Image (cartoon, coloured by chain):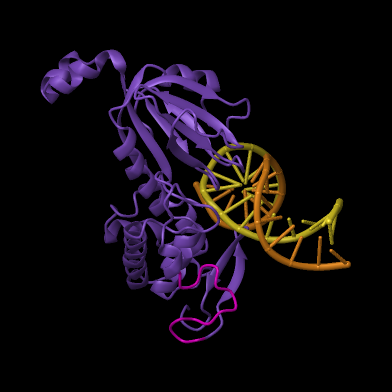
Chain colours: A purple, B orange, C yellow
DNA sequence: ACTATTTCCTGGATGC
DNA sequence: TGCATCCAGGAAATAG
């Protein structure tokens, strides 16, 4: 289940491998999952563009594209000059991996695995494939190049903004952390891990938390995300990055997936409750 | 204007 | 061994 650290790892890997390459052909399966964009629109928007950068916004992978005809001109001109001359909008390709989505760079001869929903042929002769068995993933294009990903970036928001964002909300703090319109990128694993480190139970209403507790949570969220990115994310179920490598943060999980096991701090059994339809793990002793 | 619940999807784990 | 059932969860859609 790719969350911010996994998507960050994948985006960095893809940037390293495909930026500078150009899209020649686009194939989408009949079942290609799309979001706001129709398959035909995705294909026509992508075809004939070059990939300038691949980056992450929340849990989205963003491909910044340049119309192929403009590639040479743009890179040669200074920013100031290109502002005057560049007129064609730079579209973006947005990929959300959902639960089981994977983006892989491979050779055309490589086996066409089940649940392949998109194949992008690159000028270098390689292919970029989108594979998603559960089909919770979404593909879309933004022709204007100003994709809005929702709330603030957890690693960019400062302490004061973070406190303001959550204080006074009646919803359980975990629900607020998972709300992408507030904070973008935190999912189930990192919400549980952040709350454990901050000593706050998932069900606690945000409005009952002091400024100090919210400030602590801000630090915990950033700490957990940074550590996870450093380890290449968490490989639970079948997550692998753009190079097919597994992450290692799952070995550092203190509560997620540890129901019934002993808390690493106090030895109390980890509890599991269901919140917004998902498993929430916490230590009843360390978290209040 | 809110938040809570349901729905979409398939593979793997579990149960009888 | 085989078949049914349950469970995982991101976020849009729907209900409250």
Magenta region: A253-267
Q: Is residue A149 in sight in this rendering?
A: no
Residue shown at 52%/42% (left/top)?
A: A101
Q: Is residue A254 magenta?
A: yes
Q: Vertical placement of A55 versus A278: above or below?
A: above
Residue A213 appears left or right of A80: right
**Image spot of residue A241 (x, y percent):** 42, 48
Along the line of sight, the residue nearer the viewer: A96 or A144: A96
**Residue C16 percent coordinates (x, y):** 70, 52
Q: Measuring from the top left, give residue A92's x and y in whole percent.
A: 37, 28
**Vertical comparison of A137 with A87: above or below:** below
Q: Is residue A171 visible?
A: yes
Principal secondary structure, stretch drawn in magenta: loop
Indicate whether B10 appears above or below A66: below
- Asked whether C16 or A178 is in front, the reply is A178
Give the answer, above or below, for where A25 lies relative to C7: above
Tell me if C6 is positioned left or right of B16 in this view: left
Residue A19 in percent (x, y) is at: 30, 32
Which quadrant of the view contains residue A73?
Answer: top left
């Amino acid at each position: 289940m790719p969350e911010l650290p996994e998507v960050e790892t994948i985006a960095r890997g893809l940037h390293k491998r495909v930026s500078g390459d150009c899209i020649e052909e686009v194939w989408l399966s009949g079942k290609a999952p799309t979001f706001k964009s129709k398959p035909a629109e995705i294909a026509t928007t992508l075809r004939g563009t070059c990939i300038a950068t691949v980056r992450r916004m929340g849990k989205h992978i963003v491909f910044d594209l340049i119309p192929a005809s403009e590639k040479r001109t743009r890179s040669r001109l200074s920013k100031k000059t290109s502002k005057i001359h560049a007129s064609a909008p730079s579209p973006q390709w947005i990929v959300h991996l959902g639960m089981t989505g994977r983006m892989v760079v491979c050779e055309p001869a490589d086996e066409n695995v089940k649940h392949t929903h998109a194949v992008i042929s690159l000028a270098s002769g390689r292919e970029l494939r989108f594979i998603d068995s559960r089909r919770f993933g979404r593909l879309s294009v933004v022709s204007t190049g100003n994709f809005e990903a929702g709330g603030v970036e957890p690693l960019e928001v400062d302490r004061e903004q973070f406190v303001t964002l959550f204080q006074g909300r009646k919803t359980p703090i975990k629900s607020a952390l998972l709300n992408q319109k507030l904070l973008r990128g935190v999912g189930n694993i990192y919400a549980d891990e952040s709350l454990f480190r901050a000593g706050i139970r998932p069900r606690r209403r945000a409005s009952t938390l002091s400024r100090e507790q919210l400030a602590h949570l801000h630090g915990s969220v950033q700490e957990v995300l940074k550590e996870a990115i450093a380890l290449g994310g968490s490989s639970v179920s079948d997550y692998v990055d753009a190079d097919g490598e597994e992450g290692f943060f799952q070995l550092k999980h203190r509560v997620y997936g540890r129901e019934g096991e002993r808390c690493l701090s106090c030895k109390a059994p980890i509890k599991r409750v269901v919140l917004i339809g998902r498993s929430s793990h916490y230590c009843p002793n360390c978290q209040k």
